[in-house]
Image: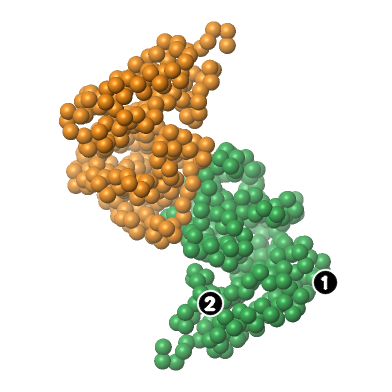
Chain colours: A green, B orange
Amino acid sequence: MRLAETREDIHSITRRWRREGLLTALVPTMGNLHEGHLALVAAARHEADRVITSIYVNPTQFGQGEDFDSYPRTLDPDRVLLEQAGCDLLFVPGQSTMYPFGIENGIRLLASPDLSGRLEGRSRPGHFDGVVTVVARLFNLACPDVAVFGEKDFQQLLVIRRMVEDLGYPIRVVSVPTVREPSGLAMSSRNNYLEPADRTAAGDLNAVMLAAAKSVESGSKDLMGVEKDTASRLEGLGFRVDYVAVRRAADLAPPGPADRHLRILAAVYWRDTRLIDNISAIQVGIPGI
Amino acid sequence: MRLAETREDIHSITRRWRREGLLTALVPTMGNLHEGHLALVAAARHEADRVITSIYVNPTQFGQGEDFDSYPRTLDPDRVLLEQAGCDLLFVPGQSTMYPFGIENGIRLLASPDLSGRLEGRSRPGHFDGVVTVVARLFNLACPDVAVFGEKDFQQLLVIRRMVEDLGYPIRVVSVPTVREPSGLAMSSRNNYLEPADRTAAGDLNAVMLAAAKSVESGSKDLMGVEKDTASRLEGLGFRVDYVAVRRAADLAPPGPADRHLRILAAVYWRDTRLIDNISAIQVGIPGI
């Protein structure tokens, strides 16, 4: 596995690959890699001839009071995992590589307001602007044919799909289903903030969401009722609920009766740790509609 | 010369060129082409194997009350000129090609505040945000190796150079000196708003700026005095002055005594027509510094 730290490094390596006609896939990460990330790398290997993984904890997507400083940084074990997973190029830029004119004087991107204003965007103002601001830089630096993102951050996935389509990047976005711990807890670097016993308890989030999906799929039409019941069940289990939402999967708008592909999304706190999860739910048709 | 109107058209043509190892240059324009644009196309031919010219009157870079609706649109003669100039591909996107999710829900880019807040950015708030918002789309759609811009819009040139560097685009920006009418008036599509006699009178703008440059180059250290004198001379000739500024050429900051490469920039109105121009001026060193 090769290592690139500067813009010149990554431009020159990827330019050579392009010239050789090799397809490249980019897996953007913030490091502290787990099985979920390795599933992204595996998907990238399947899609392309060369896999680039970036590790960069991007300050512009963290809000005031969020965990930018304490976010786990574990480059040495991450390198070993990526090497084993068959990654070809690890890109580890410093801040002056990603933001050569500083953050204040850097160009900012503002994510599509309709899509990014909802759910996570409401709870974390500016978060998706920071995401597209850094992902545009990664796309321009790596020039990948394919970019791979996890469904764990489902709204982020939609924001980036929209960005690619809106800005006209010649990049195909591939998504990978969430990888879970045995308890059902979606794998996340932020799970490190939980004690082992908490990790098991936090798995209930997924169990309660699965029950909500079952309710939708067995024909419940009172989606706001499903949201409310799900939130109370979670509160009863000791979670503090930020939001539980049943939405149209394509754009996270409130669903109409004819929308088949829904997504149930939740953000909760377990003690001080914020957890997000989402699962699919198919809304059954109303006879005669 | 080929014509592309959709994203699929331009992506497929430019992808083939890339695969064949051909270098491409993009000349972004708003059409209504004149000698100044043709000089950009000539430079592009010199720099690359294939030349793409885009014609798109971009609504997001016009402010409230500006001339978006009346901006001259002359596609048929433009095509003839580009064909004669040796352009290989003309890209003429419609609004839904450039902004497929509409302008309100589209991703916006905010230009670097330090550079874009000055001069034109002050007089035309949001103008450079609109410029980088459309140029990012053109870059992603055309994926050029080289992009060619005129020095006529000097601050725009710097804003785009900064954008390319900050966002990490693997694109080389090439600039081309301003082409002028015999009177000295910088060629511009907005000159069409002037009657022939006005065009000659407007040429005095350049003459007065040349005198200002001569004053700087002959050792005047009172740059604010030069700005003021130049503005009064222009007012005396019947121009209404928006700004006259002697700045550091690299970033348009107020120059220090050690800055050698300066730029004199002006924006004026002749009757209702806003004209901008800029020229270089070399500041002579102070002995002993």
Q: Residue at x 37, y 40 (%)?
A: B25
Q: Earlier in the sequence, mark 1 or mark 2?
A: 1
Q: Which residue is mark 1?
A: A197
Percent x, y of residue B57: 31, 48
Does dot 1 land on a helix, a strand or a loop? helix
Quadrant for residue A211, please give it: bottom right
In the rendered structure, the answer to whether residue B269 lies left or right of residue A167 reads: left
Tell me the residue that label 2 is attached to. Answer: A262
A116 is higher (above) or lower (below) than B109: below
Q: Nearer the viewer, residue B205 or B280?
A: B205
- Asked if the residues shown at circle 1 and circle 2 are in contact, with their CB atoms under 8 angstroms apart, the answer is no
- For the residues tagged 1 and 2, is the chain the same? yes
Q: Quadrant of residue B282?
A: top left
Name which residue type carries label 2.
Answer: Leu
x and y percent of residue A232 in the render? 69, 80
Amino acid type indicated by mark 1:
Ala
SS at mark 2 in the image: strand
Label 2: few (<14), some (14–19) or many (≥20) C-alpha neighbours in 10 Å: many
In the image, A288 versus B219, the foreground residue is B219
Chain of the residue where label 2 is placed in the rendered structure: A
Determine whether B162 is above or below B241 in the image: below
